[in-house]
Image (spheres, helix red, strand yellow):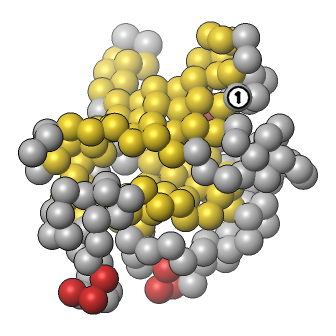
Amino acid sequence: MRKYKTFTIIPTVEATPDYSAGDVLFSPTEIPEFFTSKNSSAQIVSLFLIDKVAANTSAFTLYFTNIATSFGTVNATADAAIGVIEEVQATIPIVAGDWVSGDFDNANTCAITSQQVNGSATIHRQGIGSIVSSYNWGWGDRNRTRSIYIAGIANGTINIASTSDLIIKIGVKYL
């Protein structure tokens, strides 16, 4: 069994109008074969993001969940039912300061690991290191799967130029 694996996700986002704080950035997007079995766990150890809009340093939060149920309408205020929220296993906030602006002419990048250097101090990143499981507590054995879903909610105004502007690479460690 592999100890580490990386997954690449290109969620579908809306190009217009701009997103506002609290808007659903993208609906839950399946990451198939995320877990090694229907009874396993994994640790999220890193994120690498690419935003093809070079001017963006977008702030948003990623949500990892067992189910594909909507958090609400994309590019409208999030309005998830309590049952949907209960299925969230981990959140990872992406803040404007995480982005490296202008490192490429056509895109910005963001790399987040368990140990981030902030000036001279090393800090632990919220959400990185979270353990996620194939077990869905609310549905028991009826909904064991090897997939996980990822969704995003904007934390501020976000300008998207194309429906495929955001690329998310997730590094996991199998337990």
Residue at 46%, 31% (x, y): give it: 48
Say if 108 sits above or below 102 in the image. below
Q: Residue furthest right?
A: 17
- The answer, for residue 98, to whether it is visible in the render is no
**Amino acid type of the residue that numbered disc 1 sits on in the rendered structure:** Lys
The residue closer to the viewer here, 23 or 151, is 151
Residue 25: x and y in percent read 68, 55
Residue placed under numbered mark 1 in the picture: 52
Q: Is residue 135 above or below residue 8?
A: below
Q: Is residue 69 visible?
A: yes
| Along the line of sight, the residue nearer the viewer: 162 or 60 | 162
Which class describes the residues within 10 Å of circle 1: few (<14), some (14-19), or many (20+)?
Answer: many
- Quarter in which the N terminus is drawn: top left
Secondary structure of residue under mark 1? loop
Tell me the residue at 50%/73% (across/down): 68
Q: Is residue 78 above or below residue 4?
A: below
* x and y percentages locating residue 141 in the rendered image: 21, 87
In front: 74, or 88? 74
Image position, residue 129 (x, y; %): 27, 44
Q: How many marks?
A: 1
Residue located at (35% from left, 30% from top): 113
Provide residue 154's location: percent of width, then percent of height.
Answer: 67, 52
Q: Which residue shows up at 40% across the image and 75% down it?
A: 87
> Left of 37 or right of it: where is 45?
right
The vertical placement of 150 against 8, above or below, is below
Q: Is 79 on the left-hand or right-hand side of 2? A: right
